[in-house]
Image: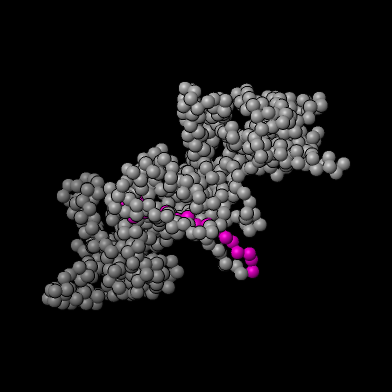
Amino acid sequence: MFSSEELYQRVLALQKQACSADPVLQSSLAELAEDLAATPSCALLIEEHHRMSQMLKCFPTPVFDEDFSPAGVILDRLRAEGVEDVTAYLTDHPLLVRQITEAVTIRNVNDAALALYGMPRGHEFYATLDHLIVEASYPDFILQVVNIWQGKDLFEQEMKNYNSRGRIIHLILTLAVIDRERYGLSRVLVTITDISELKRAHEQQALLEQRLAESERLEALGRLAGGAAHNLNNLLVGIMSYPDLLLMDMGEADPLKQPLELIRDAGTQAGAIVQDLLTLSRGSAAVSEVIELNELIRVAADSAEVVAAAAAHSLVTCRQELEGDLLPLIASPVHITKMIKNLLLNAYQACSGREAVVTIGTRNLIDRADEQAPSEAYVELTVRDEGSYLSCEHPEEIFEPFFTRKMLGRRGTGLEMSIVHGVVLDHHGSISVTTGNKTGTLFTIRFPAVPETMRGMGSHITGPSVRGAGEQILIIDDMAIQRKVLSHVLTKFGYSVRSVSSGMKAIALIESGYRPELVVLDMMMPGLDGLDTYRALREVIPEVKAIIVSGYARSSRVQQALSLGVNTFMQKPYTVEQLGKTVSSLMGEASKRTQKRDETL
């Protein structure tokens, strides 16, 4: 038998669930509710319900007052039908769970809860739970219902709900069954704590931790690539230099001329690959010069790789829109040329199999954001293709190593666009990519232009000749092959050369009275490195000329050496011509100063 209070609650529940199209049933239920409400016990229940509603209305924490008794009826029926594991049964029957969410009714919603869900009071959105519970939270709801049904009167639970705009909010619910003996499951108080911001913060933290781990992995890869590149560069000096030396004394008809040229060219190509590794490892670009970007674009467009790509994609037309009087840049011509080649090859491959246009353009940009400060000048490079657009959600992912989730048929090592990104960053530039189904893909790169005070400087070292006149040069390098190659080359050019294997030996030689006019010293050596060795040598010979060489790209130690007085930095592998011109230029400056000093005396 039901008590009058329980019967009254069930009638109210039936009223909510009854079809509005059945006026006879609605009228009968309304009359029954009125009769029950007239009984003393039900009148007391209604009074208590009104008092709780008023109390909850002004409560600062979001609160629901729910009727779980229909859920209890369904679970009682399942037990009567012989279902032993109700939780497992509900998990296997999501439609029944949906039915329970439609049966559990909400009688009281306070203002704080309305504000949380973003709805006005009285809106039907809150009549039952089916509008609120996210389907992914059905397992949590099943646990909630079974706990209440099995007699648990107080517990907390995390759950996802929808707000009025269909957005998911993350909540912690505290459920309390009020006076189970009197009200059964019809009075369950649900207190709500919104943890959406906390969840988002945790997700953001997890994302940052993932990116940090990825960054550390790439940094480790970069260190590995840099170390391998350093060792390879040391070996490539010999492979590139000795063929040049032999070719200098060889006639055009010599049968060994072509094989030596092939060896030299293979070494040069290997050197370019090593430079890619250094760029990927985020070592600075190699030798920086004042360059004209338009000229490097023409060089890249006429390169064997790009010409071959154009032939393989004969339906694609390449158009150059280069602004005249383009401002110069301070950059590594090798790296910038490589960057342009990669962008053009990527554009050709994106247009594979269709008629399309690849456009590469340049222009000057002046930033006049601050009229009180000098204007900043930039050079902008754009490469646009009309091919397949990037299908990924974030186009900038193309710059990640071995990126393959784009709709572009591409060949190569998988590092091409990562190298583009590394070159731009090493030159203090910026790069962006935009894409669209109808517009293809556009890469926009901006480099800071050469300051006005430096414009007009030449881009290459010049000198009357690479031949020396017996000047004293000291080579300091821990690798025997490097000492042999440098000694052979510089002796061939007419210099008087001595070599030692460490900084300590160089200092001892200087202290014994040897006075070189130029020292060529390796940056990475055990014991004293190039910087420390140069500091010690300057104390004895303040005017000594110096060239720092390294298989690594320009580092902070190299930069310190340059600021201290080292004349120039040469990155291995260098050609015989580069070495000859650099040494000749420095010896020429030294000779001019000596001549001027003698004239003064």
Q: Decide which of 176, 511 is in the foreground and name it.
A: 511
- Answer whether residue 207 is visible to the viewer in this image: yes
Which quadrant: the N terminus? Answer: bottom left
* Residue at position x 66%, y 40% in the image: 464
Q: Position of residue 489 (x, y in %)?
A: 62, 28
- Is 381 colored magenta in this rendering? yes
* Residue at position x 21%, y 51% in the image: 93
Left or right, 4 with reference to 502: left
Q: Position of residue 595 (x, y in %)?
A: 79, 40
Residue extent of the magenta highlight: 372-392
Left or right, 70 with reference to 540: left
Q: Quadrant of residue 550?
A: top right
294 vs 305: above or below: below
- Answer whether residue 476 is visible to the viewer in this image: no
Q: Quadrant of residue 237?
A: top right
Q: Decide which of 578, 28 is in the foreground and name it.
A: 578
- Furthest residue in direction right, as rendered: 601
* Residue at position x 55%, y 45% in the image: 332
